[in-house]
Image: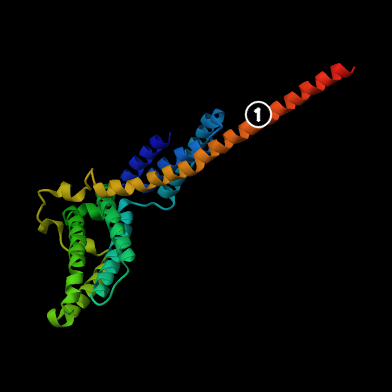
């Protein structure tokens, strides 16, 4: 049971990282765990509890869907705008950390956390862009322009990583003397980051150039869609499974052990009581 649920969690979290609907995968992951944990050692109620959770979750999905369609309709374009804003903000933060690293040591944990966030956001942007072509007219009208966005974002992250590799060497060269004008160039890049974020927030990026003036990409599908197999996503997907295995070993086994010990103690107490009753009966027979 432990390994079966662990494999299930790996599959769920692997596809959750690039899905347009990560919360749906999240629900699919935690509901079986809730049913299993709440009915552990009480298997007779498993079916009824599972049906109860199914009806409750289905009712929540139905109500939320009606609210989303009638009161607060949302499209993939809205989610694309939110993910893009988050990606640009994290990229600028990472750029700022690398820029500071040219002069002093920046926290390595902060840089690693931002890189992981960018690696998570980029596949989500690619998947959401595919959905936005279907339900967002502005994005669909400029499909060829938007098709260049995932590749440009990937190039940005690759460029930041190449810069990160050379930071230590640049610091040894005394950048102020060996790399004349570097600080001015970095300031210009920061201003461009700020300008891009402002344009994205204003929703003006889609009108940069007419779609008809942009060349068609021969490998457009390969650029837009995230790869089906990604070792980094798989490694990340192992985290909840390992956490579950650790929790299983710390909870289930001690619980079963304590239950067995308690059962043995109850059995010993019951045996002592039976022996006492037999002795009482024997004494009573012998006495009277």
Spot occupied by residue 153 in the image (x, y as percentages of width and height)? 21, 59
Pointer 1 residue = 267
**Front residue of 179 and 254:** 254
Identify whether 12 is placed above or below 91. above
Q: Is residue 246 visible?
A: yes
Residue that appears at 18% across and 54% down = 147
**How far across and down, in percent of the image, does residue 86 sit?**
32, 61
Residue plotted at (24% across, 47% down): 231
Residue at left offset 23%, top offset 43%:
229
Examine the image and state in which quarter residue 117 appears: bottom left
Q: Please say whether residue 17 is visible from this viewpoint.
A: no
The foreground one among 254 and 11 is: 254
Residue drawn at the location 69% of the way across and 31% of the way down: 269
Which x, y percent locates residue 173? 15, 77
Q: How many marks?
A: 1
Screen quadrant of the N terminus: top left
- Asked whether 116 or 225 is in front, the reply is 116
Report crowding for label 1: few under 14, some 14 to 19, many 20 or more residues within 10 A (C-alpha). Answer: few
Identify the element where label 1 is drawn: helix
In this figure, which colouring scheme has been used for the structure?
rainbow
Q: Examine the rendered structure and indicate whether residue 49 appears above or below residue 250.
A: above
């Amino acid at each position: 049971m432990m390994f079966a649920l662990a494999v299930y969690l790996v599959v769920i979290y692997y596809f959750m990282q690039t899905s347009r609907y990560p919360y749906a995968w999240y629900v699919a992951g935690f509901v079986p765990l809730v049913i299993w944990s709440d009915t552990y050692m009480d298997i007779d109620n498993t079916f009824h509890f599972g049906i109860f959770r199914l009806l409750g979750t289905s009712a929540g999905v139905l109500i939320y869907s009606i609210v989303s369609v009638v009161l607060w309709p949302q499209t993939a374009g809205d989610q694309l705008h939110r993910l893009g804003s988050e990606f640009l903000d994290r990229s600028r933060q990472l750029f700022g950390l690398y820029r500071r690293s040219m002069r002093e040591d920046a926290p390595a944990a902060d840089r690693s956390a931002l890189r992981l966030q960018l690696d998570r956001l980029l596949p989500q942007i690619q998947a959401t862009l595919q959905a936005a072509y279907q339900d967002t007219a502005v994005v669909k009208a400029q499909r060829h322009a938007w098709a260049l966005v995932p590749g440009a974002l990937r190039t940005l992250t690759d460029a930041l990583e190449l810069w990160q590799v050379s930071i230590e060497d640049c610091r040894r060269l005394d950048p102020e003397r060996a790399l004349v004008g570097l600080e001015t160039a970095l300031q210009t890049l920061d201003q461009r980051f700020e300008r891009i974020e402002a344009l994205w927030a204003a929703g003006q990026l889609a009108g940069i150039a007419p779609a008809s003036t942009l060349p068609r990409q021969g490998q457009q599908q390969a650029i837009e869609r995230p790869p089906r197999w990604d070792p980094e996503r798989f490694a990340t997907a192992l985290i909840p499974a390992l956490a579950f295995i650790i929790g299983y070993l710390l909870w289930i086994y001690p619980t079963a052990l304590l239950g067995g010990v308690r059962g043995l103690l109850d059995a010993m107490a019951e045996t002592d009581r039976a022996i006492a009753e037999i002795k009482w009966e024997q004494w009573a027979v012998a006495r009277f």
